[in-house]
Amino acid sequence: MRFFEIILLVIATIFPILFLIKLKIPKRKTFAILIGIIFALHLVLEGARWQMSLGYLIVLGVLFLLWKQTIRVNMNLLVKIFLTTGFGIVLILGWFLPSILPVFKLPTPTGNLEIGSKYIHIKTDRPESITWDKDDKRELMIKAWYPAQIAGENSENYLDKGSRLGFADKYGLPGWSMDYLDLIKTSTYKSPEVANGKFPVLIFSHGHYSKAFGYYALIEEIVSQGYIVLNINHTYESTGSIFPDGDIKLYNTTYDSLNNNQEMANMAWNATQEFNQAESTKEEFKAIKDLMEDYIAAESIKRWSKDISSVIDHLENEKSFLFLKNHIINSNIGVFGHSHGGAAAGQVLLEDKRVKAAINMDGTQWGTMVNSTLNKPFAYISSDWLKEQPNFNKHAFRNKSNADFYNIKIENSGHSNFMDIPLMVNFSAINEEGSIEPFKAYKITNSLILNFFDKYLLNKSIDILKNEFTGITIESEF
């Protein structure tokens, strides 16, 4: 929480208790004026947000009681108990809400380059399989993050409208509940000129039903070090996409319910039970082989892989990417992604010869990898999975690789430690983070990503297997 927020909540805690025990408060109007000044400073310097509403309510009540000087109300014991209990509940919520949904700070990028971004709309000639109109074609919104020359441009707000509304819709919240994100300071500027020089391109693919652009902690650092990152928003499969005409396409729950159906649930359940009961590696593989290829996730991984290839097609030919034309090292394209997007990065490495190297961050590698052998550099960076979580990936990568392959675990991390979520939702019981400090997890992840792509896209002499970080495990086998 912010400085004046804490002071206001302390006031909201102490003064009502003083009123309840009927302690005499001298110079009550002076206290009221001081509290009023603190309240005004908070509104002006920090800005109001809805999470503080209950705290504001109590503080306004305190101001009223202080200014009124004397209030005599006869209350029986039952009424006192009711009011005290009610106040306690409101006070607890008053502290809880701004604590778990804070005005958080993003890590400060450490690179020498400033960061700019532009949104790009691309239209493909591929059929849109998630809608029911046979004439629909797949359209995507891309956020291009790039090294920039800043000349008076404003920094952008945290998350676009589509991501905000989609995130609110996912959790049954009103759209305005995300407006407080305007208070988050980013290091990314709106549509500045590209910095002088040429840079390798990375394509980033987000997690399934997540905020496509909710990875500032990773991407801002990577761009500041000299990379262009094309951040895909996989339409209908992120929380939400907003298009240039203002049309917002949220996650398609109807498609999901029809396709991720009971048959798929039974397939996953039965395969997992057989996997857990297997007495040998051979039996484990037999249990899940069909699941890895036929599960609904494998279908969407292939679709996302084609989305990535479509972005590369448009990067080479589309006018909307012309502003980057003289700043791209065309032959050096890498792909990385988180969760479902990480699996898509692995899939496109198999399918598209233009992709030179890829990283899967904590994604189960559904799709054809189980029957394939890699021949380009690949890294799998995982969180610290619970022992009871079945590790299908040791079979997905069973055919190994003819090129450099890394299996890296970030100790004490959770699935969301690759996203901004641990900062946005400060409550480990629901945000899927590990016990690792979030900024440490981002630092380790960014160092691994940059070392990997510096080595394989920029041909720098880097020994990734040399463990320069505390808190990671590098293994050659699963």
Image (spheres, rainbow, N blue to C red):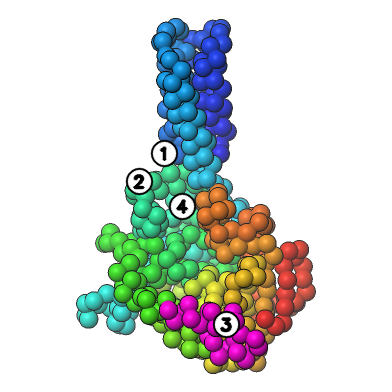
Residue 73 in sight in this render? yes
The residue identified by callout 3 is 275
Relative to 356, say whether 219 is above or below: above
Quarter of the N terminus within the rendering: top right
Using the image as rendered, state which of residue 107 and residue 102 is in the foreground.
102
Per the image, label 4 sits on a secondary structure element best described as: loop
CA separation, marks 4 and 1?
17 Å
| Span of residues in magenta | 266-288
Residues at badges 2 and 3 in contact (C-beta under 8 Å)? no
Q: Earlier in the sequence, mark 1 or mark 3?
A: 1
Of marks 4 and 1, the one in the foreground: 1
Using the image as rendered, state which of residue 449 and residue 274 is in the foreground.
274
CA separation, marks 1 and 3?
47 Å
The residue identified by callout 4 is 158
Q: Earlier in the sequence, mark 2 or mark 4?
A: 4
Q: Earlier in the sequence, mark 2 or mark 3?
A: 2
CA separation, marks 2 and 3?
45 Å
The residue identified by callout 1 is 50
Per the image, label 3 sits on a secondary structure element best described as: helix
Three-letter residue code for mark 2? Trp
Q: Earlier in the sequence, mark 3 or mark 4?
A: 4
Q: Earlier in the sequence, mark 4 or mark 1?
A: 1
Using the image as rendered, state which of residue 246 and residue 300 is in the foreground.
300
Residues at badges 1 and 2 in contact (C-beta under 8 Å)? yes
Specify few, some or many for label 1: CA neighbours under 10 Å numbering under 14, 14-19, or 20 or more: some
Q: Residue at image x 51%, y 65%?
A: 146
Q: Position of residue 360 (x, y in %)?
A: 57, 75
